[in-house]
């Protein structure tokens, strides 16, 4: 039976640890990071389009406002890349149902691109392996390969070389959202400015982090959360310090700016604590929204054929 389209579900991520090395000649920083995929998803539907229409993108959902539908959207670039690499029919219609915050440090744009890669692979029956998909993903952006793999993984290089991490257990998160996004290049630039004159070591993952994950120990994990981009995100958005303070005051095991921010991710002990913190953050007036999620969860995968 011919498939008309597929729907792919793709998770957001938090960085449990993000160690940033010096700026390289290629304009990127060498990083070592631990990603966790969490249960906040975008849904990407990919269908055969009308003849002659090319790649068409439409967007809906609570975080869709202001997201571009032209080729500046990574999802369109992902489709163009697959079309040229595999000589595919160019009429593809993509719809993004967005729940992941835009420019929030949670790989929302990367998730959509990953969804398009997995969707086109399935729709055109290309039979690409996860490795092949991750290699193509790395051409689109540093976080796209992890959006394909999901789970808990270590990212090296630009963050695009993914190795699954040994871990057990599942974790409860409360995400404090900001009304306005932060630009990833701007945060990296601010990080360089704050570190000017310092000698920066090559990035490494701490033993405490790996031990906490192996043991499945949320308390130890809460203490091991670190992000070298956090001072830069807080420098550009000083209100984030207040958000971090509120979260810790109301019982979080640990709190961290996710990636380049401005989302702040709080790790909590259980469902009850997650509800308490959600109420406290909402009442504090320092955040624009609060979302509860758990992790780890799967990477980009087809949930429906049309
Ligand atoms: O790879 P991606 O397109 O997501 O990166 C966006 C920007 O973030 C890069 O142009 C660069 O300024 C910065 N970046 C970096 N080092 C990384 C990843 C991203 O400096 N490892």
Image (cartoon, helix red, strand yellow):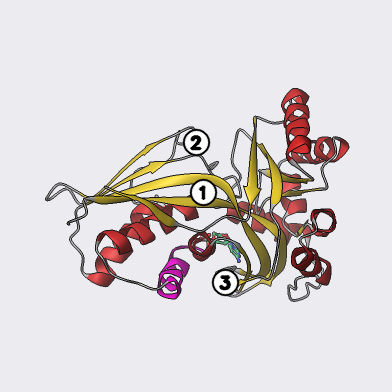
From the viewer's perspective, is residue 92 above or below residue 240?
A: below
Badge 1 is on which residue?
Answer: 108
Predominant secondary structure, magenta span: helix
User: Which dot marks residue 169?
Assistant: none
User: Which residues are the magenta region?
Assistant: 130-141
| Disc 3 residue crowd, few under 14, some 14–19, many 20+, Cα 10 Å | many
SS of the residue under disc 3: strand
Residue at mark 2 to residue at mark 1: CA–CA distance: 10 Å
Picture quarter containing residue 190?
bottom right
| Residue at (70% x, 66% y) in the render | 167
Instruction: Name the foreground residue: 106 vs 194.
Output: 106
Q: Position of residue 254 (x, y in %)?
A: 81, 49
Q: Is residue 246 left or right of residue 29?
A: right
Badge 3 is on which residue?
Answer: 162
| Residue at (51% x, 49% y) in the render | 108
Q: Position of residue 74 (x, y in %)?
A: 41, 54
Q: Note whether residue 68 is visible.
A: no
SS of the residue under disc 2: loop
- Let me know if residue 63 is in the magenta part: no
Badge 2 is on which residue?
Answer: 63
């Amino acid at each position: 039976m011919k498939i008309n389209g597929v729907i792919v579900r793709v998770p957001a991520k938090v960085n449990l640890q993000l160690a940033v090395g010096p700026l390289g000649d290629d304009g990127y920083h060498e990083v070592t990071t631990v990603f966790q995929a969490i249960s906040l998803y975008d849904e990407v539907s990919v269908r055969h389009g009308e003849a002659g229409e090319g790649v068409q993108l439409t967007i809906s959902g609570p975080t869709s406002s202001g997201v571009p539908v032209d080729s500046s959207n990574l999802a369109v670039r992902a489709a163009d890349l697959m079309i040229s690499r595999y000589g595919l029919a160019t009429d593809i219609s993509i719809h993004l149902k967005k729940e992941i915050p835009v420019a929030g440090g949670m790989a929302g744009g990367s998730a959509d691109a990953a969804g398009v890669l997995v969707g086109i692979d399935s729709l055109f029956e290309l039979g690409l392996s996860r490795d092949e998909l991750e290699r193509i993903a790395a051409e689109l952006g540093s976080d796209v390969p992890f959006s394909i793999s999901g789970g808990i993984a270590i990212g090296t290089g630009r963050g695009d070389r993914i190795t699954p991490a040994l871990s057990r257990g599942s974790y409860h998160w409360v995400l404090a959202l900001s009304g306005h996004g932060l630009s990833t290049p701007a945060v990296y630039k601010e990080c360089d400015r704050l570190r000017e004159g310092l000698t920066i070591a090559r990035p490494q993952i701490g033993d405490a982090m790996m031990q906490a994950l192996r043991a499945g120990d949320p308390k130890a994990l809460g203490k091991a959360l670190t992000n070298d981009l956090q001072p830069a995100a807080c420098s550009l958005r000083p209100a984030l310090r207040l958000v971090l303070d509120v979260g810790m005051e109301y019982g979080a095991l640990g709190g961290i700016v996710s990636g380049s921010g401005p989302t702040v991710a709080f790790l909590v002990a259980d469902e009850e604590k997650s509800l308490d913190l959600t109420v406290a953050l909402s009442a504090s007036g320092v955040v624009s929204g609060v979302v509860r999620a758990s992790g780890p969860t799967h990477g980009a995968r087809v949930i429906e054929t049309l």
